[in-house]
Amino acid sequence: MPHFPLDPNNADPHKKSHLVGGFHHRIFFALRPTIEAASEALDIAQVYRNRHSLTGPSRPNAVLHVTLNGIGAYRRLPDDIVFGAEQIAATVRAQPFEIVLDEVMSFKHPGQPQAFVICGRRENETLLDLRNQIQEGLYEAGLPYNAGGHLTPHMTLLYDRKTVLPEKLGQPVRWTVQEFLLIHSIYGKSEHRVVNRWPLLG
């Protein structure tokens, strides 16, 4: 089976505002914030919406996430790729770890609304190892994967035409990651379906 490297700069499955040819079903591995962390993040979005006169609505709490690895966009959900991804995820071993998002900025997408994100640039070896295990498993199975070793964990809070320059937060958003998920996203519906989830047990 051939390997399909994805563009590492397009790891967020919601970066593009249009999908060509009806590829409306996207699959990706991700982390989800706790209820408390999601609420804090959306509060930050409101602060910056007021400060910079942003008009884009905040994303629903239920779709906030940090992408680990995209597995492509499809016309319909491919059962074989989902099954393969689940088999790979079952082999991953990692300890629970803390994720810290302490900076806001806009990710530019030429000709499209920009993603206003909260992100963290500090080194997080456990997070990187988790992503690398998934990436290597996808590669070995011949499934789509994100090439490249750099990872800036980020969570998109809203989309807007205006640019927000990078700014450190006085109070970071943080939570302890206890699991990772395989998510099926239906484009245009702000709907994420959890295909499966795996606890971090070390």
Image (spheres, rainbow, N blue to C red):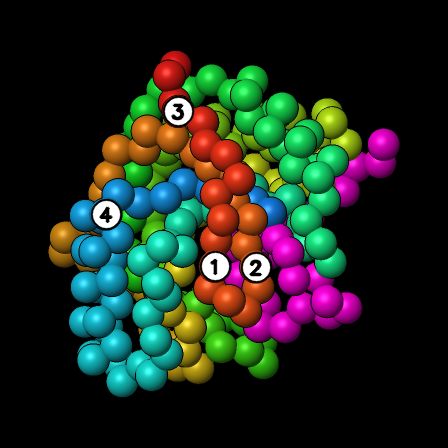
Q: Earlier in the sequence, mark 1 or mark 2?
A: 2
Give residue 186's mark: 2
Q: Earlier in the sequence, mark 1 or mark 3?
A: 1
Which residue carries the number 1 mark? 191
Q: CA distance from mark 2 to mark 3?
A: 24 Å
- The stretch of residues the image draws in magenta is 1-26
Give residue 199's mark: 3
Which residue carries the number 4 mark? 35
Image coords of residue 181 (percent x, y) = 46, 37
Image coords of residue 130 (percent x, y) = 47, 28
Q: Earlier in the sequence, mark 2 or mark 3?
A: 2
Q: CA distance from mark 3 to mark 4?
A: 17 Å
Label 4: few (<14), some (14–19) or many (≥20) C-alpha neighbours in 10 Å:
few
Query: Can residue 104 be found in the magenta stretch?
Result: no
- Name the residue rendered at 54%, 69% in the picture: 188
Is 20 in front, or is 86?
86
